[in-house]
Amino acid sequence: MASGLADTEAEEKKSYPWLSTGLKYGVTGGVLSIVFFLVMWLLKENPVSMLRIFDFVILPIFIFFTLKEFRDYRQGGKLTYSQGMTVSFVCYTSLALISALFIFIFLSYADTGLLIRHQQENMAVLTDDPQKWIEDLGQQTYDKAIAEVKRITAMDLALDDLLKKTLIGLFFTGIITLFFKK
């Protein structure tokens, strides 16, 4: 019976190499995103504001290695554009979901003060030189921006992280897939 279960698992892995490869790197990247967040938090930085640094550096690296492993070890050195887009989608989407879920839980339960600090930092940017903002954006847009900063929730920041990681991942996937396509 154990042999039959192992055969089934091996067959599933062969059937969906794009899923296993994408999840492998996506989950690893999601965990690394959490580690980055916690390190910045422990260093008394605002990790919410620093996530884009992580996204533009780490996301392309994880997409690169996802595509490299998939092409070289799962596809015999060949990769079509659609295969690259699919396996990378699994990678960056799973990474983004893990990161967003962690951010929501952390800001909702572990450190609600970080959410308040994030609001205060954004408010300080807007209120430091309000005349400049009003001249550039107009009074109505400025007032709307102030109101939106006051209403930011943990869910808003988690969804923002999910959306940005997904869009950044999609952007880099298109470029990196072209590089690997044969």
Image: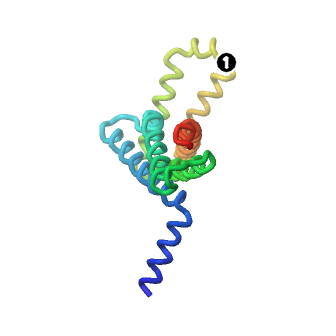
Residue at position x 38%, y 47% from top?
A: 32
Residue of label 1: 139
Task: Please state, as top left, top right, bottom left or bottom right, where the C terminus lies in the image.
Answer: top right
Residue at position x 55%, y 63% from top?
A: 16
Residue at position x 49%, y 34% from top?
A: 119
For the residue pair 105 and 16, the one nearer the viewer reads as 16
Q: Position of residue 65 (x, y in %)?
A: 44, 46
Quarter of the image where one finds residue 132: top right
Q: Position of residue 93 (x, y in %)?
A: 55, 50
Is residue 162 visible in this depiction of the protein?
A: yes
Q: Position of residue 38 (x, y in %)?
A: 35, 45
Location of residue 139 with respect to 73 vertically, above or below: above
Location of residue 21 with respect to 34 vertically, above or below: below
Q: What's the image's color scheme? A: rainbow
Residue at disc 1, secondary structure: helix
Q: In the image, 63: left or right of 46? A: right
The amino acid marked with disc number 1 is Gln
Is residue 117 visible in this depiction of the protein?
A: no
Task: Please state, as top left, top right, bottom left or bottom right, where the N terminus lies in the image.
Answer: bottom left
Residue at position x 67%, y 17% from top?
A: 138
Q: Position of residue 157 (x, y in %)?
A: 53, 42
For the residue pair 13 and 94, the one nearer the viewer reads as 13
The furthest residue to the left: 43
